[in-house]
Image (cartoon, rainbow, N blue to C red):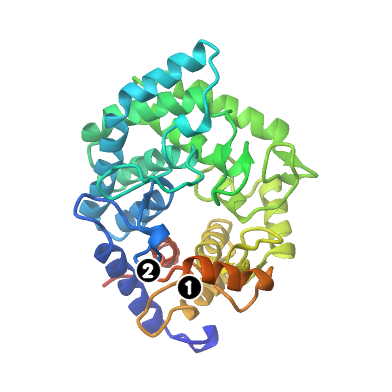
Amino acid sequence: MTGADALRPDDLARLLRRSVDVIRENQDEGGAYLASPSLPTYRFSWFRDGAFIADAMSRAGQAESAEAFFRWCADIVIARGDRIESLIARHRAGEAIDRDEHLRCRYRPDGSEGDMPWSNFQLDGYGMWIWALGAHASRHARSVEPFADAVVLSARYLAEFWDEPCFDWWEERFGCHTATLAAVHAGLVTAGELDSRAADAAEAANRIAATVWAEGVVDGRLAGELGDPRIDASLVACSTPFRLLDPDEPVVEATVRALEAEIAHGGVHRYPGDSYYGGGEWLLLAALLGWHYAEAGRRDDAWAQLAWVAAQANEAGDLPEQVESHLETPSALDDWVRKWGPSASPLLWSHAMFVTLALDLGLSLE
């Protein structure tokens, strides 16, 4: 598939089916979704990526796949229950906690923690998996009872540490990130709806919303970090899908206009000046923006985003993490290729976001 203008409905439907197959083929028997089979550093499962992937599979009618991932998440959380309780007790006692003592953002498929140095402390995924579980349960009228203890434990962890600095979606910046707060907020709201034992969830969610309005809005739009006006494509998630803000909020509309002016032109960069693999255009972000366009009533723009993503597929129908046709920092590309090899392809998160946008626009897997 080459060239968005050359794509036909059959091409999109074929890529939709292929995307579901890619995800299924790269789901471990224990439920974990490998981020990408092609890049050694991505042969892990992230709570963040996995939540979006499970949500896409749920939308595609692959309920067993989604629930296998939720079981994997729940098992990891339950296995670290004593650790979570200790962290909460120490925090309430005023003890300093090193960021490496917190829960990890990614795990091996067997649930073990890798020993490779990584930006491990990220809260977003622990909110996202609860959000995805709640959406799945509602969509398919499924019981959350098998996951309830893990939901409550995750919510207690998030309610305690939501205002602690951690790494952002991109595992680069350490601070209090607006998109992270939106993900945590979504998880806490969902936890409160799923289980009455998540007593602290609603209060913490309200505090997050108040904090974002007070410190996460700069010059009429969302800021990438509390008090920091930098623009970041992950901010779209504050509205779509996490609903910290509604799609028609003026603050959201101003944020999207800023993204369109600086880093979105079909493909979407993570942020201005990105240097990871040269700072290319990310397919999952292009689809995320398209999903927001669809929710905001900009259907033609949403279809354009879908077509752009589909046009990046290779002959096998694999979608990469990013493409190199429009780099923010071209001089950095070769250094990353020498360090880790070619960038990830296929990336399951890219396929998942294509599935989500395609189904939202009415394409069918039939």
Dot 2, how many residues are within 10 Å of its Cα: few (below 14), some (14-19), or many (20+)? some
Q: Quadrant of residue 226?
A: top right
Dot 1, how many residues are within 10 Å of its Cα: few (below 14), some (14-19), or many (20+)? some
Query: Residue at the bottom extreme?
Result: 6
Image quadrant occupied by the N terminus: bottom left
Residue 150 at x, y percent in the picture: 30, 31
Q: Quadrant of residue 191?
A: top left
Image quadrant occupied by the C terminus: bottom left
Residue 244 at x, y percent in the picture: 56, 39
Residue 141 at x, y percent in the picture: 25, 43
Q: Amino acid at mark 1?
A: Pro
Q: In the depicted view, which residue is nearer to us: 149 or 355?
A: 149
- Report the side of 262 relative to 242 (left or right): right
Residue at image mark 1: 342
Q: Amino acid at mark 2?
A: Ser
Image point 48% across, 34% down: which residue? Answer: 100
Residue at image mark 2: 38
Mark number for residue 283?
none
Q: In the depicted view, which residue is nearer to us: 116 or 297?
A: 116
Asked if the residue under mark 2 is in contact with the one under mark 1, i.e. CB atoms within 8 Å, the reply is yes
**Is residue 125 visible in the rendered structure shown here?**
yes
Q: Quadrant of residue 245?
A: top right
Q: Is residue 231 above or below residue 127?
A: below
Image point 60% across, 71% down: which residue? Answer: 333
Q: In the depicted view, which residue is nearer to us: 357 or 89?
A: 89
Query: Residue at the top extreme?
Result: 93
Q: Secondary structure at mark 2?
A: loop
- Report the side of 344 relative to 262 (left or right): left
